[in-house]
Every structure is written in C-alpha cells, then in structure tokens.
Image (tube, rainbow, N blue to C red):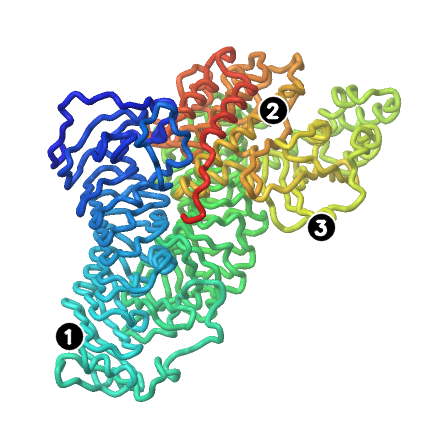
Amino acid sequence: MSTLSTVAALTLPAPTVDWSITCPFGTYASTFSFDVPFCPPSTACLVDSKCQRTKVFNRSVVEIDDRIELIENLPNMTTLVFRGNGLVRIGMPLSQLPTPTSAPTSFNITSLYRVETALVSNLTLIDNPWIVGDVYLPYELTTLNMINGTANLDQFRVRDWPPQLKHLAIEGAGVVTFSSLTQSFYNRSGFVTPLATFSGRDNAVRQFEDFPPAEILDLSNNWIKLVRTIAFENATSLILDNNPVVTVYNVGSPRNQFSFRCANCNISIFQTDAASLTTLQNAKALPSATSLAADCEARNTVLQTLPNFLSTGICVVPSSTFPNQGQIVVVPACFPNATQALTSTNCLSKGAEFCLVDAQCREVEPFFGRDETMDFQGKPTFSLAILSFPNIHSLTIRNVNVSFFNATSVSTLENLKLVNITWSNLATNAPSLPALTSFECVNCGWGAMSDAYPWPPSLKRLSLRSNKLMSFREDATGNWPKNLDFLDFSDNSIETFEGIPSSRELVMCNNRMRTLDLKDFNHARFLDFSSNALRKITLNSIDSHDNITLILEGKGLATLTVDDATFRSLQAGNVTFVSPQGASVCEMGELKTASSRHDSFSACVVGKSWTAAMIIGVCLGSAFVMGCIVYLVMRVRRHKLSRSMIDNNFAALVELSSDKEEQLKFLSSIEASVTASLTPHRLNTDVKLLDTILGRGAYGEVVLGDYNGRLVAVKRLREDNATIKNIETFIQEIELMSRFDSPFLVQFVGASWTHLADMKCVVEYMEKGDLQTYLEATAEDKEVLFPWHDKIRSARDMTRGLVYLHNQNVIHRDLKSRNVMLTAALDAKLGDFGIARDATDESMTNAVGTYRWTAPEVLKGKHYDTKADIYSFGMILTELDTHAVPYADMVNDRGQALGNFTIMYKVMQGKIKPTLSETCPDWLREMALECMAFSPDDRPTAVDLEARLEALLIATEPMVTSPTH
C-alpha cells in the first residue's frame, strides 16, 4: 500500500486517447507517468502495458511503494522517493511514436525523454536493485540517493549527469567498484566542479580508487585496507570509519583544513613525502596510527609526530620522490595488458604476504592471511597479471580474466583454486609450485591441457571441472601427477577414456563418453561415470575392496564386459553399481547375472583381463578371411559393379578387416568412381591446417585452417573412424553441401583430399562458434551480451535456413544449438549436414540426431518429414531463453541429472517438455510450445515461423536516439 494519499478509489475517466494499439509501455506491467497524454493534466498516475490507467495519485505525492517497472515521467516536486517498486528502467523515448489523430491539443512532447525536463531536485531510490541499461535523470536534480540498489554499476548507465547535481549517495548495495560510474561522471557534458558530497557507505569496496570527485567522501563500512590520497586532491573531508585500513600513503598537493577520519581502523603505516607534509600539518583531523621508528627506518623514512596529532605516528620520506625507489622492485613497464598484477615482491604494507599493484607497480591492496580469496565479481572489464604466487597456505581467485602470466619464482603455496577464470592455459614454463597439494580450475574455459606442464609430485587433488576439455593424448598419462587421491573432470566434453591418470577418487560425470575401457584402477575407491551416453563398458582387475563406489549409468547400455576378478567384486556387494541396463551382448565369454548393493546387472564375464581393443580385435580377426575373399572377388568384378553395389555388398565386410594396407588398396581402387561428383569442387590449393581444434563429433573433428589467406573450418574424419562406411557418409555430406546456395547455411568452400581416407570438407569459418557454446558463455550476463533483439534475429536466420532446406526437400535431421553457427555479428547459419536427407526418401524411419532435440516420431522409428526439424527448432528456442541445453535442470529421484535415455523415453511418451524461465517472453513461450507439439500436424511450418519472427524483429527494432543523448 502506498504511503501517499491517492484517489485510486474514485471512478477514473477513460483516457481521451486509445493508446492500446500504439502503447509504448507494452513490455512493462506497470509504468509511472505524469501529465497528459497518459495521466490527467499535472497529475501522476500508473498505467498498465496497454496504457490504461490503474491508479492516480494526488498532487501531494511524496513516497511511492507501488509495483512499478518503468518511470516514464516525474511530477514537478522538490522531493520524491521510490521504495521497493521493482524498477528496471528510468526514462522512455516518446518522440518517435506517431501522434494519435485523436490526441488533445495539449499533447506536445518537446523532449525525447520527458523525465529529463521534470522539476525534481531530490530523488531517492530505495530497495530497487534491478535498474539496468541507460538511465535518464531530471536536469534540475541536485540530490540522488540510491539505497540498497544494484551492485553492478556497469549495468546502471546514466546518459547525462544533471549539471546541478551536488549530492550523490550509493549505499548498501554491495558495490565492488565505482569505476564505471566515475568514468561516466567525468565524461558528463558541462562538468566543471566536483560534487559537494559523495557517499559510498556500506558496500564491498576493497580498493581506494575510482570514486567520483567530491569535497566530502564518505566510504565508511567497506573493506578498504590501503589508502592513497593522491587521487583525491579535491577532497577536504575523507571518512573511512569501520574499514580495515592498515596503510595510508599521503601524496599530492597540499590541502588546507583537510579532515581525515578513520574510526575503528588499525593503521600501522602512515607515510607521507616531505612536500605533502603541509597537508597533514594543517589538517582538521587525522586518524590514529601506530607507525614505529623501526617500521619507518625499514622504508628509509623518519618517524615524526605533529603537535596537534600526537597519536598519529607518521613516516616521512626525506625527498619528494615517493615511494622510495630503493624499497620496491620495479619492472620496466611493470606488466603488459592487465589492469593490476598479483605479486609478493612490491608490497610495502607491514606484514603483507602479497598484494595487488597497479600499472606503475604501486601497491593498491595488501593481503595478510594464510588463506586468502580474491574475488573480482562486479569488475567485468578487470584483467589480472600474475607476476608471482604468495608463500601462503591457500589462495582462491574468482571472476577475472588472467591476461598475463610470468610467475617465475618458487612459492610454498599448497592450495590453489581458480573459479570462473578466463585463462588460455597453463604455460609449459610455469613454476611447478613444489608444495602444491591441491589445484582446481573450475570454469576456466580450457579446451586442452599442455602435455609438457611440470605437475608437482606433491599434488594430491586435481579438479578441472566445467571446462571444455574434449580429449587427452593416449600416451599422456606419464605427465600427470603420480600420487593423485582425487581427480575431477566432470562437466566437460570428454569423449574417450584415454590418457586419464589413475586416482583413488575419479569423477567423470556429465561428459560425452560412449565407451569405457577401465583398467589399472586397482587402488580406486570412488569412480563416477554417471550422465554419460555409455554404450559399451569393459572393466578389468577391479579387486575386492571395502567401501568402493562405482557409478555407471547408461540406459542404452548394450555391452558390459568384465573379467572374473571384477565380477566377483561386483557380486560380493563391495561395489555400488547404478545402471538400469538390459542384458549384455556376450560373444567372448559367459553371460552372468548378479546383484550389487543397489541393482541387479548382467555382464559378459571373460576368463581374464580383456580390453575392448582385444575383444574387437578377435572379432575383426575372425572376419578377416571373409573380408579377403570378398575383396578378391570384388577386384575381379569391380568394373561391372555400380557404386551402390560396392556400398551394399562390400563396405560392411571390408571395414571388419584389421589389415589397414588392404583397406587402403581397396579405397585407392574405387577412388576415381567415388569422387567423380566431387571433382568440380576439389580445391586447387592446399589447405593449411592450424593447431586449433574447433570441435569434435562422434566420427570426425573440425580444425581451423588457412585457405589462400582466408580462415576456414576444415572437417575431417578421425583416423580411427576412417572406415569405408564413414567415408561414404562423409562424401554424401560433401555432395549435399555442394548443392546448397543460401546465406543462411554455412558456406561450402570445397573439398580436398590426397586419398579417400584423407577426405576434407572446407567451409567458411564462423567467428563466434556454435550457438550452444555462445549461450553458455553469455549466461551470466545474457541481457547485455546476447540481447533479445539479436536472439530474435538469430532465430529468424535459422528459420530462413530451414525454409531453404525444406524447399529443396531436404530434412536436416540433426538440428540443435551445437549445429547452429554464429558469425562475428551474431548472424546464425545452419551447419553439419552429416545426416541430412532428401525428404522424399522412403527410408526416413531411422532415429537419428541427438535425443534432447529429436522429435518423438523420429525416436519411435516412425516415418517423419520436415516437421521433425520444426520440433528441434522449438528446443533451440528454449535454449535462447534459458542459456542451457533442454532438460538441464531436471533430475531423477536420486537428485542426479536426467540421462539422455530417460529423456528419450519421456519424449516418446509426450510426458516431458523443457523448462522455460519466469522471464521468458510470451511470444517465445507460445512459439516454442507450438513447435514442440507432440503431433507433427500441430507444428507450424518454417515459412510461417520465418514470417512471424521477421514481424517481431521489425517491431523490436532498437529506436535511434537523439545525438544529444
């Protein structure tokens, strides 16, 4: 209930203008406005999304606590308070709207933003932390108070600071830095004099820098430990009560009557140069400081006390040069390409273990504890250089871009944790940190690990979860730490269990493994492979131990092969086996059934330790003779055989052959006939392959390449998957792409090969990568990094790609966010046509694609058409809302993420839909549900979707603002 008197109970007259069609507030549930055309003359009111009045305030309005999302205009009052309203925006442009023909003659919008002309001098916003974007304030404003508001001032952008503003308070918001606000304040037009007062009380500021210029600065109740007054020559009063200040450097021009208050501080070093001593001698107030003579001498300074401040011990530098060059290690240019640097050598604060220094190597923040956390949340543009690691027990660094690394000195650091760090990778010449026992790098964006990194032998715990790791070299196990107790590779994109070191506890959940060959893990106590798409599992030599936990999930599990010792361990109940799987296929041993603590299971038990490669090798060997016989027959008759006969009668048997030389001979013999259709598209110039792997799939990989000076993406089969069947499928994909000509499909450049097994498909390079990765990367700040207008345009581009394909009678069949590619301008293009097929193909019953995006009729093996792509597009729409893959938030009864096969079953039954967020736009919710309709007949066409998205794109086109704003 508002604290103001209102006339809401009166019968409100209908507005003189019907704004329901052209209402500019359609995206806001409630808007505060003043005066015509939305309110009665000289009166404030609330209007809904159709510009219909819902409440009218009387003219003595003082404080408002009604639900309000937008302030469009303010009344002409001295003081106005908004409390707990849910505000998201202040200021709305109106001049671009067409004036209704029925508008009254008094309707005359003279300003682009009417709120700027409001005669309000004191504005207070309390408990409104959701204001984001450009903010427009009254030009006559002299006082602005924001209490318990937004902590991230990068999202609170004042376009024009009022020239008369004298008092600014941003309190109780948890602000880490005022740098973006200060920068915009200095850039304001007409800026001449500083503020009279600035209050940043009760926030989370750690560094004494980047505050708006003011005569009185009140920064009480923050976390400031070090103060340099050089940047505050305008201040006559500085209040730092209840900060953990330990060090003060007074540098700058002398200021008369300077007042410095720091109640409940613990200043141990108060230092000044001789030239600036006048400021302190004329001060009105100074805080206590316990500087000792020995502390001053260690800094080549002299202890001195002033007659008026006997409790303030001051270390005075004899010369005007400050800080003393003999006491600081200065690197030329200090460090490149970073905002600040972590070091343990340039710290002047008494007892500091390490510190942050600025670009001039001046200490800006000291750290004293044995266990420290450096969190740069709220500083999105901040970058960190690491010059040395401290000699402490543990260090955690969060939310920062590590742009430079040159830590060459040895540190006794034992625990290092990096969270939400942008850091390319560990350098191979990085120090080994010989005492390090635990290292975590969570969400660091790592896509690969250097095999040459010198891991310390003392390392016991290693976590690289939530990165982008895809594989490790099979022979890389020798480079890992030798005595790991805990290893966590969860939430990556790892496909094969190769190059993984042995550990007592191993967490591999939420990866992309389909096969698992587990050996040499005899001392393991906990193994978690849940939420992988495991199909084949081979377990060897897992001896019986108490309290072993082995978690294997795979609802489509076809083969579980174990040796005798492992089966006895499972049967004895010493293993927790979580896997609701059916009967295994068993050709090389005996099919047995047993029960573990949680589940019964079937396994193919062989007499001794077998690896998957050994089992497959026996199978291939048994087929080799037949392969050779068929090969000889085909050599005699190959000139009579059509390509389809080769595909149908020969490829399946030859690919069983274990003789690579025989396969290569056969491939060479059929190369001319198979590649005839590709010859017009064969590139005359070699494609140079670069070292960057852009992605991996089930059979191939995509590598960054250079073709005639142009960056391209090069798709090729992995060497271990270059079977005739896969080569045939790959060539069909290239042939299909060569037919396409659409700006909304990834552009086909050409094909390149020296022999069939070396076939490469060259396409245009998409700078932003795939949509799924970009959505994950922008999830933390999606409204800024991927605004809705760009999302609508990307969705429109996808439908245009589908319109083209469907007009060509082609079904994509694997449409998902991973196969939607983005240019630097966020234009979307469809890619990866490895399983795309002609829509008239009578065999369109195979369940292809990725389960989370696949239509129910496809999963059921029924005949399907282009509407299957529409279903997949609906799933992508949900990702544009949540920035997560479909069903990512859903868990089973044990609280574990749903596996692909659980999702597949529920989709087939029509019993599951992805979750949409509470803030999901209505248009997207409606469109996504239509696309995901269980019956294909109920889904729209690509043509219909393209038209609707195009209209929506035009309706949401950003308005062009006046050059004065």
Residue 298 visible (yes or no): no
Q: Which SS class for mark 2?
A: loop
Residue 480 visible (yes or no): yes
Residue 82 position in % (x across, y down): 20, 41
Question: What number is the disc on residue 285?
Answer: 1
- The residue under label 2 is 812
Residue 687, relative to residue 323: is it above or below? above
Q: Nearer the viewer, residue 312 or 946?
A: 946
**Amino acid type indicated by mark 3:** Gly
Q: Nearer the viewer, residue 84 or 541?
A: 84
- The residue under label 3 is 709
Query: Mark 3–mark 1 contact, CB under 8 Å?
Result: no
Label 2 vs 1, first from the N-terminus: 1
Q: Mark 2 or mark 1, which is nearer to you? A: 1
Who's the residue at 63% across and 24% down the image?
804
**Amino acid type indicated by mark 2:** His
Who's the residue at 46% across and 75% down the image?
331
**Amino acid type indicated by mark 1:** Ala
Residue 457, relative to residue 573: is it above or below? below
| Mark 3 closeness class: few <14, some 14–19, many ≥20 residues within 10 Å | few
Residue 35 position in % (x across, y down): 25, 34
Mark 2 vs mark 1, CA separation in Å: 75 Å
Mark 3 vs mark 1, CA separation in Å: 67 Å
Q: Nearer the viewer, residue 697 or 79?
A: 79
| Mark 1 closeness class: few <14, some 14–19, many ≥20 residues within 10 Å | some
Q: Mark 2 or mark 3, which is nearer to you? A: 3
Label 3 vs 1, first from the N-terminus: 1
Mark 2 vs mark 3, CA separation in Å: 31 Å
| Mark 2 closeness class: few <14, some 14–19, many ≥20 residues within 10 Å | many
